[in-house]
Amino acid sequence: MPAAALLSIENLHVDVAGTPVIEGVSLSIAPGEMLGVVGESGCGKSVTALAAMRLLAEPPMRVSGGAIRFMGRDLAGLSDIEMQAIRGRDMAMIFQEPMTSLNPVFTVGDQVAEVLHLHSDLPPRACLDRAAELFATVGIPAPAEALNRYPHQMSGGQRQRVMIAMALACGPKLLVADEPTTALDVTVQAQILDLLDRLRRDTGMAVLLITHDLGVVSQYCDRVAVMYGGRIVEQAPAADLFAHPRHRYTRALLRTIPASNPPGSALPAISGTVPPPGRRPPGCSFHPRCTATVAACAHDLPALTGDTHLTRCWNPA
Amino acid sequence: MSLLEIKSLSKTYPGPDGRRLHAVSEVSLRLSEGEVLGVVGESGCGKSTLGRALLRLIEPSSGQVLFRGRDLTALSRSEMRLARREMQIVFQDPFGALNPRHSVGRIVGEPLLVQHRMSRAERRARVAETLSLVGLDPEAADKFPHEFSGGQRQRIAIARAIVLNPKLIVADEAVSALDVSVQSQIINLIADLRRRLGLSLIFISHDLSVIRHVSDRVAVMYLGRIVETGPTEALMQEPLHPYAQALLSAIPRPGVPRPERAPLAGEVPDPSAPPPGCAFHGRCPRAMPVCAETRPDLRTQGDTGREVACHLYP
């Protein structure tokens, strides 16, 4: 774990109405780093992101254990008002669906200016000028005119750029991006990911990128954490993880995608489905679907071990 | 003879300010018996409209759809209903496509009720047979959709599509909503059914890696038109149209370094006000003056079986 971690999540546990969803996740992210958290639906990647922002819907969700430190402070110890001061200023978040994240009855310019108004001493006119600068930074054409548009007058890609502009407004140290390009077309996805990559290199902002897309993490992230059943099962520098996957789940996932197989061939499918929270099996939660199990897999939870390449597997490759 | 021949099919809708919105424009395609044709493109390119219009689930505005030489667009409603016995569609969302209040047996057996005179016992036997064909326990017939996972629900939707033994299936983003580990199971199932039942498929998807895996031939659409078609591997290895090139280079593949490329600038134009000339010229890195003036026709490229609509390939 890097000494100068910007954000560190330590042994996080989250319950939903008493059912464990996150069962001991530890992660850290350094300034300027892009860390990918990848997994299939129900693995707990989005809940981890929300917990990091202290945005869990409580109740029914609840942090039942562990700690989240951001810029050296334990977030659990902060009041709601202190937390609001950090959110939007030092840490910001963007989501999959930019339509539902924007308010339909205000112009996008006003919505970006509002963030500046809340977190800075800029006078209202200067907030709008700054919003136009931010629109230019994120590649919105004719930024000054775009300020006066409403969300429905923009395309999905442009709305996501507005969300990014809003997130960047106060120069955050950390951007949490939860499936930011999943609703977008691939050519627009490439534009948005290139933008995030350029921003973190230019400004030293760290990016926590949550996605289901192995290709995206492989091409854009420095490090990757693979989640399954509410836990991290493998974590490594991206190049290392994709060249030498060790956990049986990661390997099966990479082998099963069409791009890894000759056209028309039978895909090496993974049997069964991802177990939902509350029905996760004991031991390694992947063991019922795994083709390389040993005796311990069904009973004992393996630890996440390793130096820079960590694996939670009794029988790693 | 082709199983299916689409001739200059168009679908327009009333658009804003009295304009017409061109969802599909003059699309011509052929599908041979047993063939899988992939139709790929980004949202709004018209691929789903094409899939529905060729089955007349929405009425085409003009053009013909010949199924075994017979023009579907000339059929009456009742004739079309009979013809649909041989052509079925599978949708993206296995949650929205199945009635939650009906048992799986009723869902899968309903086409038999509509299309065949069968006894209850015959119907039940046919449903059980079909369920095992798609990898489900025949006892699933007595359960309800909510008792199944997303992947299993897609198996149910596929069972309903094949229960009448159709010749043609339109699969519209049929694996797009599924998790990676489940997606491959369904892709394998479709490939298996294609072989066993001699199905022909129109496989519509935005996902090029899936299209590449399942299709014999591919058609790339942009703003309602086909910009390139050809045998899958030839097209994927060396796309000719600049849009097809951009689309292919934009897909991030795990373990493959990010290509040195400037991502395509801009976005898809408004289909109710398509630009003059080639609809792609505003975003095209290789646009020439002619591209803004004259729309390129889809032209055959020698004897490669490929067609491209681009002024770079006269």
Image (spheres, rainbow, N blue to C red):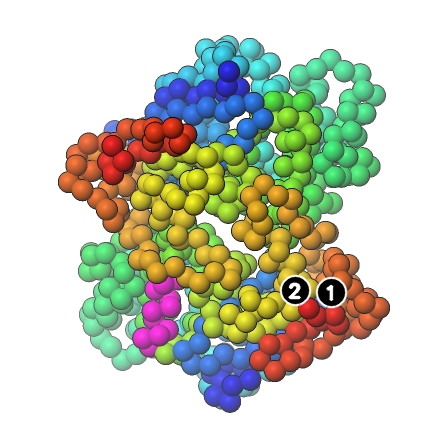
Residue B237, picture quadrant: top left
Residue B270, picture quadrant: top left
Front in this rendered view, residue A206 or B239: B239
- The residue lying at 39 percent from left, 44 percent from top is B238
Check residue A197 for magenta coloring.
yes
Q: Residues within 10 Å of mark 2 (few under 14, many from 20)?
A: many
Where is the C terminus of chain A found, in terms of image quarters?
Answer: bottom right
Q: Earlier in the sequence, mark 1 or mark 2?
A: 2
Chain under callout 2: A
Q: Residues within 10 Å of mark 1 (few under 14, many from 20)?
A: many
Q: Which residues are magenta?
A: A192-203
Residue A298, picture quadrant: bottom right
Query: How far from the left and from the top, in percent, is residue B145?
Result: 70, 40
- Which residue, given by chain and number where applicable, does mark 2 sit on? A228
Marks 1 and 2, how far apart at CA: 8 Å
Check residue A310 for magenta coloring.
no
Q: Main secondary structure of the magenta part?
A: helix
What amino acid does circle 2 point to? Tyr
- Marks 1,2: beta carbons within 8 A: yes
Query: How far from the left and from the top, in percent, is residue A91?
Result: 43, 75
- The residue lying at 49 percent from left, 12 percent from top is B69
- Which residue, given by chain and number where applicable, does mark 1 sit on? A285
